[in-house]
Image (cartoon, grey):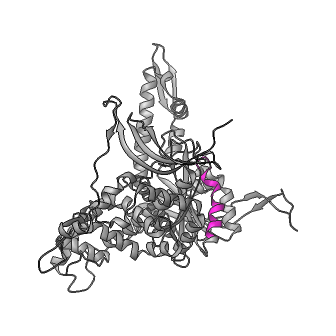
Amino acid sequence: MSRPIKGDTRVIQVKQKKANGVIYVYERKVKYNPETRSNDILSSKLVGKITPESNNAIIPTKFRAKPQTEKEEKRIPVRFHMGMLSILDWIGASSGIEADLKKVMPDSTCGSLAERIAAIAKFWVATGGNTLPNMYAWQVKHGIDKDCMISEDIYRAVFEILGTHDGFIQEYFKSRAARLDTGDSVAYDSTTISTYSDSLTQARYGFNKDKDGLPTIKVLTLYSLNTEQPFAYWSQPGNLPDSICVENALKQLDYLNVTKPTVVTDNGFCSQENIIHYIQNHIKFVTRATRSDGKWVKDSIDQNLSLLDDINNVIDFDNDITGTCITIKPTLSYTAKYSCSSHKKGDKIKLTPRLYLGIFRSRSRAYEAERNFTRELYQLKALIEEGNEDRLSETALNKASTYLSWSKTRNGGIKVVFRKEAVDEALKYKGIFCLCSNKINDAAELLKLGRKREHIEDMFELLKQKTDGKKTRVQDTDRLKGRQFVQFIALSYYDFLYKKIKDMKATLGKPNGDSRHDLKDNLDREKDLLKWLKNSSLNEVLQWFDAVDLIQLTGKRHKNIKLITETTIRDRLFLERLGYSGQMKIN
């Protein structure tokens, strides 16, 4: 007979070994759940670690000061960093991020869900992607009220709630989409997140942007190109190719009430099926295309290469690039999903839509690509001449066979010559790229939209590096969904600041016709600020203002004395041009 289930709360010790050999020891309160036949974790506390040098002895974690009592707080001077956090609070208010969170997120067992989400997102932005176990010390240093502090149990609960209530997340996306301009251009792109976990159902082996050999989860994000803000995302298994995701993107845009957008994508989403989806749904699109995306693309490039040598086709805002836009009517086909008066289900249907193909060549890219290509061929030539043909990889050997020809000489050596026609054929396409659209028929306008989309790649790098998003960090799919949403909020903070600084840099140091502004001293200060911004990352700018402190003292005549660190002229100019108003701005 089996033992009866007590269902009482127990404390157990759990050891987790990391890749570096360090074993972390946790104390967990657990309670058996007969429905799931497993223990529910009520709380978890890191008590120490075992290193290879400690001989299995547990090294206690760092001492953390206990929160002060109200009497102690009144007597003891308090000093904390407030500059960076003030800017982040301003970003949350000015961008509408926090207002949209409060609009759709309810209160929960862990307090105001909107405030908790914003607090975790700000921590990631402020620390450049530090891990959440370090959040407690950061909150103490930045004067967070003890009643508002985020503990390990709280951020776990936040992730759990968000992961099991997808409606909250979708309503937030709808609120952000409502802020888009009418007819806004929408960029759509993806990245992959690697994981060591074997318990996440979405983790699959497929294309991996980090090339670390791990299974991945794919995150697809929708961006407004006018505001340069992300407004929605979703995740899916890592083995699904980008090219089949456009149909879901169009459905999500419909749910979010985004009307008449121009969808801008990279060449990973360019396919015959996707172009047909756009046309059938009356969606304007711009997508990057390559010669391998269809014979009609390759033929169009070949027929118009000479136009790229014409000085009249140099792009006015970038003299490094020549471009032309041609009208084409390729023959596309698809299989009918339903029967109707004109065809039956399963029939092959042909379309000949009017498309516009922008063909561009970058002189600098062509020169760099040609130099690298030539250097690689000469390295292959040298290896073959030395008799090391058997050491070449399959890819290298295929390239050598395409562009080189070799034979043995009478004296036993190896003679290698270049296949001139093949080399010339490859070189003529260096530096060339294409943008295809069903709406825009101007080369310069196509290039502008393509350039705006390239900003997304930088934002994905920020998502991974600055929001602790390079690895999943959780072992549960629902918690992962909640964690990804908070990372998305942190990315929105970054993007808002990025756009503000980008707009600021475009005007700094330039006369605007205002006699007071155009004084030499003012322009020199702006040029000094511009130089600093060009040499500083977003995170470095925030860290610079983290030196602004607030000191609270108690005097005989004044019960509450507040001293704020002074700011430099350049700092005040930055805050003014940013649009920030608050305690740091001193008139």
For image coordinates 37% across by 44% down, the residue present is: 47
Residue 412 magenta-drawn? no
Q: For the magenta stretch, what is the residue range? A: 237-254
The furthest residue to the bottom: 515
Majority secondary structure of magenta residues? helix
**Closer-to-camera residue (54/419):** 54
- Whether residue 537 is visible: no
For residue 486, above or below residue 561: above
**Closer-to-camera residue (472/74):** 74
For image coordinates 41% across by 61% down, the residue present is: 120
For residue 504, above or below residue 362: below
The quadrant in which the C terminus is found is: bottom left
Horizontal relation, residue 504 to residue 9: left or right: left
Tell me residue 555's x, y (percent): 13, 75
Tell me residue 20's x, y (percent): 38, 35
Horizontal relation, residue 149 to residue 73: left or right: right
Report the number of discs: 0
Residue 251: quarter of image: bottom right
- Whether residue 52 is visible: yes
Tell me residue 430's x, y (percent): 48, 49
For image coordinates 18% across by 68% down, the residue present is: 75
Residue 250 magenta-drawn? yes
